[in-house]
């Protein structure tokens, strides 16, 4: 890194140095700002067995084509902290056959979009990519998440979560990107992932049925394209684990004003502190847990346990467990003034 060495003359092809550098597998060329992308590639070509390459902090604004056969063994590439500003620059890297890990943090990327957008759901780009680091970019979050769901092998994602849409939760990323196992260095269990998927289906059940969805969906089910663009994996998820209940017949019924439905509850924390919250009886236990995770800044891996005591309970009365994530708080007869006990 930070070298200002001149490249060998054109007559000295990189292949002439292959024997000298045949055992080098990891090359770091950060902060070599006098080199452009093609010069960095020329340097890398001197190392025939390169599996990891870092070219961060090089003020690169463009990435040109990678010659056929070049970087064919590469599994990790770091181009972070270069002002690329356009995701199309990364298309040049998409056909590297063994690339598994890509760092594009802090590249000023406003969105993610693949060259074959509008074709079949899975993209032909980055077929081997399992880990992607794309934090600290001004992304249009959920549209970019939908695009990332097209990566066939993506399991590990680092992603900025400046959520712009009230209806979305960070946990929905696990549902939208079906292959994902780790988000922002937090691994999800199989049960947690299934819970997030069920919550996602439940949350968008009405738009799904409005878009032409069925309670018994098949691969032949045709949905409105606007819905498909916003929820590209929803149909397959509904096919795999079951469609959500159609609640449209219930949503138009006359209801009491929201302010009259709200429950004021006290949440008792393990250290004895209390949080005062107002909840609708229709709030799911899973959503309540998500809200508490965010407000207390708990990791996704924290196993929250909830129970409650009624306001007018006897002294020796046991806490009532809130032990079903996809029941609403009203199902447990939670009332105004009750105390919720939180532990993890």
Image: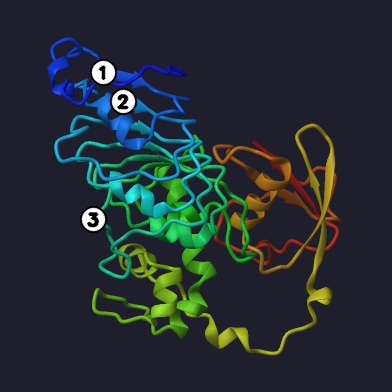
Quarter where residue 26 is shown: top left
Q: In the picture provided, is 162 more to the left or to the right than 190?
A: right
Quarter where residue 190 is shown: top left
Q: Which mark is residue 124?
A: 3
The residue nearer to you, when weighing 105 against 331, is: 105
Label 2 residue SS: strand
Foreground mark, 1 or 3? 1
Nearer the N terminus, badge 2 or badge 3? 2
Do labels 2 and 1 touch, CB within 8 Å? yes
Q: Which mark is residue 52?
A: 2
Q: In the picture provided, is 136 more to the left or to the right than 61?
A: right
In the image, residue 71 lies at what x, y percent?
22, 32
The residue nearer to you, when weighing 193 against 42, is: 42
Q: In the picture provided, is 188 more to the left or to the right than 123?
A: right
The residue that label 1 is drawn on is 25
Which residue sits at x=29%, y=36%?
100
């Amino acid at each position: 890194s930070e070298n200002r060495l001149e490249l060998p003359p054109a007559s000295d092809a990189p292949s002439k140095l292959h024997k000298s550098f045949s055992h080098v597998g990891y090359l770091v060329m950060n902060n070599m700002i006098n080199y452009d992308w093609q010069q960095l590639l020329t340097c890398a070509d001197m190392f025939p067995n390169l599996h990891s390459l870092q070219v961060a902090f090089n003020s690169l604004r463009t990435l040109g084509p990678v010659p056929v056969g070049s970087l064919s063994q590469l599994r990790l590439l770091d181009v972070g902290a270069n002002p690329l500003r356009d995701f199309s620059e990364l298309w040049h890297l998409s056909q590297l056959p063994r690339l598994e890990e890509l760092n594009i943090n802090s590249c000023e990327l406003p969105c993610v979009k693949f060259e074959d957008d509008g074709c079949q759901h899975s993209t032909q780009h980055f077929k081997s990519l399992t880990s992607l680091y794309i934090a600290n970019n001004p992304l249009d979050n959920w549209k970019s998440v939908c695009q990332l769901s097209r990566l066939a092998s993506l399991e590990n994602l680092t992603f900025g979560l400046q959520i712009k849409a009230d209806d979305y939760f960070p946990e929905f990323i696990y549902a939208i990107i079906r292959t994902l196992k780790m988000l922002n260095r937090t691994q999800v269990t199989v049960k947690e992932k299934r819970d997030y998927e069920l919550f996602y289906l439940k949350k968008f059940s009405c738009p799904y049925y409005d878009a032409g969805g069925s309670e018994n969906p098949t691969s032949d089910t045709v949905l409105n394209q606007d819905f498909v663009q916003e929820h590209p994996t929803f149909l397959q998820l509904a096919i795999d684990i079951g469609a959500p209940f159609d609640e449209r017949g219930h949503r138009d019924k006359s209801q009491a004003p929201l302010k009259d439905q709200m429950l004021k509850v006290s949440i008792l924390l393990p250290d004895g502190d209390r949080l005062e919250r107002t909840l609708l009886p229709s709030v799911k236990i899973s959503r309540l847990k998500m809200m508490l995770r965010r407000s207390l800044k708990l990791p996704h891996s924290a196993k929250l346990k909830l129970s409650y005591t009624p306001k007018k309970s006897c002294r020796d009365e046991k806490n009532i467990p809130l032990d079903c994530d996809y029941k609403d708080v009203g199902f447990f007869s939670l009332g105004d003034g009750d105390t919720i006990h939180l532990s993890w």
